[in-house]
Image (cartoon, rainbow, N blue to C red):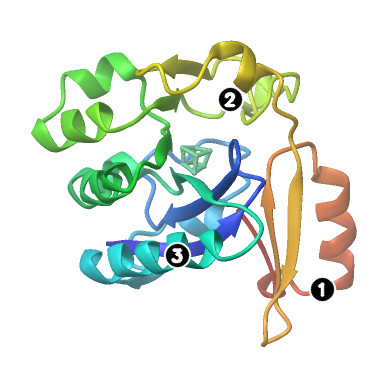
Amino acid sequence: MRVHRILRETAAEGPGLRYCVWVQGCSHHCPGCFAKDTWDSEKGRWIEIEDIKEDLRRAIQSAAGKRKDLEGLTLLGGEPFDQAQEAAQLAKEAKKHGLSVLTFTGYRLEELRKKGPAERKLLKRTDLLIDGPFEEEKKSFDRPLVGSSNQRFHFLTDRYKKEDIMSWKNSFEIRIDQDGRIWINGMGDLAGLRDYEKRRHSSNEISWD
Ligand code: SF4
């Protein structure tokens, strides 16, 4: 699977503590996208799906030994459905361990249902699908987890209730890696902070997911 970034534990990408995979490559190119460095499908790095599954199992064990169990897998990007086969395998592994699966997509559910078997498998293994491209003119952070008002929540299983997700609060996390790069993830109106950081750092020192 071509991957932009993996976070083994995050509390800012959906309910509970989650293993989060940003896939590399996105065919939508939404104007105003905050994650443009995930667009190019030649970038990122290739990681064998078996290696990600093994890492997920280790993350589950590691979280269980600490403060909180891992609740789920979040797939976002980039476009997870552009690598539907690999994403579906990962979702299967997550389900095997009782994790929930939250998948973000720039496609609409109706389009995905007409695609191939891999897309249908990923849909079948997704508990909550958040669909639709980011539309800059409809930018809104009134609802959790989404950046524009056209994006929709599809509760594909009974794992989550609408009221639980709608009462979830957006947040973001900031990490500094060993090379001094600043990584920010989560959801919310961060434009002001991004502009501030751009003035302080060259653009290749800060990454937004
Ligand atoms: S689908 Fe998401 S990652 Fe892809 S261009 Fe749109 S906002 Fe960016």
- Comes first in the chain, label 1 or label 3: 3
Label 2 amino acid? Answer: Glu
Q: Quadrant of the N terminus?
A: bottom left
Marks 3 and 2, how far apart at CA: 39 Å
Where 117 sits versus 49, above or below? above
| Residue in the foreground of this view, choosing between 147 and 87 | 87
142 lies left or right of 127 = right
Q: Where does label 1 land, which residue? A: 201
Q: Residues within 10 Å of mark 2 (few under 14, many from 20)?
A: some
Q: For the point 55% across and 29% down, which residue is it?
A: 134
Q: Where does label 2 land, which residue? A: 135
Q: For the point 44% across and 59% down, which residue is it?
A: 60
Label 1 amino acid? Answer: His
Label 3 amino acid? Answer: Gln
Where 110 sits versus 181, above or below? above
In front of the other: label 1 or label 3? 3
The residue most toward the left is 117
Query: Residue 68: x and y, percent?
Result: 62, 53
Marks 2 and 1, how far apart at CA: 28 Å
Marks 1 and 3, how far apart at CA: 37 Å
Query: Residue 99: x and y, percent?
Result: 40, 42
Q: Where does label 3 land, which residue? A: 61
- Comes first in the chain, label 2 or label 1: 2
| Residue in the foreground of this view, choosing between 61 and 109 | 61
Q: Are marks 3 and 2 in contact (CB under 8 Å)?
A: no
Describe the element under mark 2 as helix, strand or loop: loop
| Residue in the foreground of this view, choosing between 162 and 148 | 162
Question: Which of the 4 quarters of the picture holds residue 43?
Answer: bottom left
The residue most toward the front is 65
